[in-house]
Image (cartoon, helix red, strand yellow):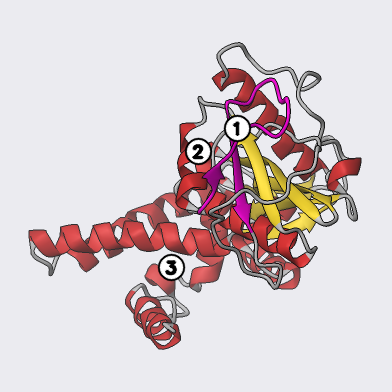
C-alpha cells in the first residue's frame, strides 16, 4: 500500500529540485558533490560524513577526490589519530558553500513564488510532516550487545534523565537490576535505535521462560522525540517477547514520566497491583501477548511470578 504514491512523489521531487541535472544550481557539479561540500561545513571526519549521508565508501571517496581536484576540499589524517581522515573546506570551498547557500535560497523561492499564500502554508506544513516521517523511516532498530559503546551511551543517558526528572534523583544501585548479563540472550535483549549510525534510543527485555517478560530501559533522545520511536520500540519488544513464548509483558514506571504512562495506556497496557518492590515505581502495567507474534490488551491479570524488574522509560517519543 502506498508504493505507487511514494514512487510518484520521488520522481516529482527529484525533477523539481534539479537532482537529475549534472550541473546542479549551475555550479558545474551534480547534487551529490554539492551535498558533500555542504555537509563538511567547518570540518568533519570522513567516517561520520559517510554515515550522515548514508553513502557507499567508494562513492564518497570519488566525490571527495572531485572536490579536492577543484581545490574546494582537503582530506588529511586527524591531528590526534592518523587513522581518522578529516575533510575540511579550503577558503575557496567556504566561498563556494556560501554561493550554494544563496542559490539554494533562490531555488526554494522559485518553488514558493508561483503559489498563493495559503498554498505556501499548506506546502511548508506538508514538507514539515514529510520530513518527520522520512526521518522516522530512516531509524534502524536492532538487537545489540549491551556492552557496545553506543548501547552504553543510551543507557547512561537513560539513567541521567531519570536523575533529573525524579523528585529525589535516581540511584541505580537501589533499583532492581537489569545489568548487561540480564540483557544478553538468552536471558534478555537490548534493542538499539540509530539514525545515520548515531544512537538515539533503546529498549530492553528480560525473559523468564513461560512467565511474563519485563520491559525496561526504554529511552528516546530528546532530539528524536515526536518520531513515534517510543511506540516502535515498545511494539518490537512485545514482538520479541511473544517470539520467545512469553504470555505477557509487564513494566513499572514513575509518576513523573507522564509521556511514558500515556504511551503504555494507549498501547493497551492495563494497570495492575504492584508485582515487585521497585523503590522508584508508582505504577505497574501489564499486557497479554499472543505468542504467535501479535499482542492484545489483557482484561485480566496474567500469571505473575516473582521477578526482578528495572525502572522504566523517561520518555517514549
Give the answer, above or below, for where 15 lies relative to 98. Answer: below
| Residue nearest the observer in this picture, 54 or 136 | 136
The residue labelled by disc 2 is 261
Q: Secondary structure at mark 1?
A: strand
Q: CB atoms at circles 3 and 2 under 8 Å apart?
A: no
The answer to which of marks 3 and 1 sits earlier in the sequence is 3
Give the answer, above or below, for where 7 lies relative to 169. Answer: below
User: Residue at the spot x=68%, y=67% of the render?
Assistant: 60
Give the answer, above or below, for where 153 lies relative to 243. Answer: above
Q: Residue 36 vs residue 198: left or right?
A: left
The stretch of residues the image draws in magenta is: 268-288
Which numbered disc, 3 or 1, marks the residue closer to the eye? 1
Task: Count residues near mark 2 (Cα–Cα under 10 Å), then give few for <14, some for 14-19, many for 20+.
Answer: many
Residue 73 visible in this rendered orientation of the protein: no
Q: Is residue 91 magenta?
A: no
Q: Residue 98 vs residue 239: left or right?
A: left
Residue 275 in the image: state x and y as whole percent: 70, 34
Q: How far apart, in angstroms, are the residues tagged by discs 3 and 2?
A: 52 Å
Q: Is residue 269 magenta?
A: yes
> Residue lying furthest bottom in this view?
4
Which numbered disc, 3 or 2, marks the residue closer to the eye? 2
Task: Count residues near mark 3 (Cα–Cα under 10 Å), then give few for <14, some for 14-19, many for 20+.
Answer: some
Residue 28 in the image: state x and y as whole percent: 47, 72
| Residue nearest the observer in this picture, 264 or 285 | 285
Q: How far apart, in angstroms, are the residues tagged by discs 3 and 1?
A: 55 Å
Residue 213 visible in this rendered orientation of the protein: yes
The residue labelled by disc 3 is 27
Q: Which mark is residue 253?
A: 1
Residue 259 in the image: state x and y as whole percent: 47, 37
Q: How far apart, in angstroms, are the residues tagged by discs 1 and 2?
A: 7 Å
The answer to which of marks 3 and 2 sits earlier in the sequence is 3
Amino acid at each position: 500500500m502506498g508504493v505507487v504514491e511514494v514512487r510518484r512523489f520521488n520522481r516529482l521531487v527529484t525533477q523539481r529540485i534539479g537532482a537529475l541535472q549534472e550541473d546542479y544550481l549551475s555550479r558545474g557539479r551534480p547534487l551529490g558533490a554539492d551535498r558533500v561540500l555542504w555537509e563538511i561545513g567547518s570540518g568533519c571526519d570522513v567516517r561520520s560524513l559517510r554515515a550522515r549521508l548514508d553513502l557507499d565508501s567508494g562513492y564518497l571517496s570519488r566525490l571527495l577526490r572531485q572536490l579536492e581536484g577543484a581545490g574546494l576540499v582537503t582530506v588529511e589524517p586527524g591531528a590526534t589519530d592518523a587513522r581518522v581522515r578529516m575533510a575540511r573546506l579550503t577558503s575557496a570551498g567556504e566561498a563556494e558553500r556560501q554561493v550554494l547557500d544563496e542559490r539554494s535560497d533562490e531555488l526554494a523561492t522559485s518553488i514558493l513564488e508561483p503559489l498563493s499564500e495559503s498554498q505556501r502554508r499548506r506546502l511548508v506544513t506538508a514538507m514539515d510532516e514529510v520530513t518527520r516521517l522520512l526521518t522516522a523511516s530512516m531509524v534502524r532498530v536492532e538487537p545489540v550487545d549491551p556492552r557496545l559503546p553506543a548501547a552504553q551511551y543510551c543507557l547512561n543517558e537513560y539513567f541521567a534523565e531519570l536523575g533529573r526528572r525524579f523528585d529525589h534523583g535516581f540511584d541505580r544501585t537501589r533499583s532492581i537490576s537489569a545489568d548487561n548479563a540480564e540483557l544478553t540472550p538468552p536471558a534478555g535483549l537490548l534493542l538499539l535505535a540509530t539514525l545515520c549510525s548515531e544512537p538515539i534510543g533503546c529498549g530492553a527485555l528480560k525473559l523468564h521462560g513461560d512467565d511474563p517478560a519485563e520491559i525496561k530501559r526504554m529511552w528516546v533522545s530528546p532530539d528524536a522525540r515526536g518520531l513515534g520511536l517510543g511506540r516502535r520500540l515498545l511494539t518490537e519488544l512485545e514482538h520479541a517477547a511473544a517470539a520467545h513464548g512469553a504470555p505477557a509483558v509487564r513494566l513499572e514506571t514513575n509518576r513523573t514520566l507522564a509521556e511514558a504512562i500515556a504511551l503504555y495506556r494507549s498501547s493497551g497496557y492495563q494497570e495492575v497491583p504492584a508485582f515487585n518492590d521497585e523503590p522508584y515505581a508508582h505504577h505497574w502495567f501489564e499486557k497479554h501477548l499472543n505468542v504467535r507474534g501479535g499482542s492484545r490488551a489483557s482484561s485480566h491479570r496474567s500469571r505473575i511470578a516473582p521477578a526482578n524488574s528495572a525502572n522504566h522509560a523517561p520518555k517514549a517519543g
